[in-house]
Amino acid sequence: MSAFAEAMRERVRDARAALETARADGDAYATAVAADELDDALRVARAHGVDTDASADPEEGRDER
């Protein structure tokens, strides 16, 4: 596994954790920031063919408004 691929996986894991924490805290701003970070991390990973987690929902970073 390349260092880039592992770094992307770690970025996605961190973003998912931040999103989960922000949602649990009920912090709308932190949720929006974390969702944007997750979206960006997933976009970059996909663009470079990095599999981050096949079971992840591609819309998980977006609010359900």
Image (cartoon, rainbow, N blue to C red):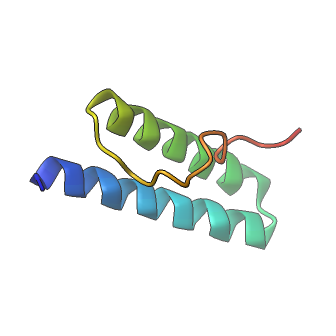
Q: Which residue is drawn at 65% across and 70% down?
A: 21
Quarter holding the C terminus is: top right
Considering every residue shown, the one lying at the far left of the view is 2
Q: Which residue is drawn at 39% across and 51% down?
A: 52
Instruction: Say which quarter of the image contains residue 24.
Output: bottom right
Quarter holding the N terminus is: bottom left
Q: Which of 16 and 26 is in front in this view?
A: 16
For residue 13, side relative to residue 50 (left or right): right
9 lies above or below 45: below
Instruction: Say which quarter of the image contains residue 47.
Output: top left
Q: Which residue is drawn at 44% across and 40% down?
A: 42
For residue 50, side relative to residue 33 (left or right): left
Q: Which residue is drawn at 76% across and 72% down?
A: 25
64 lies above or below 12: above
Considering every residue shown, the one lying at the far top of the view is 47
41 lies above or below 9: above
For residue 63, side relative to residue 37 (left or right): right
Total residue callouts? 0
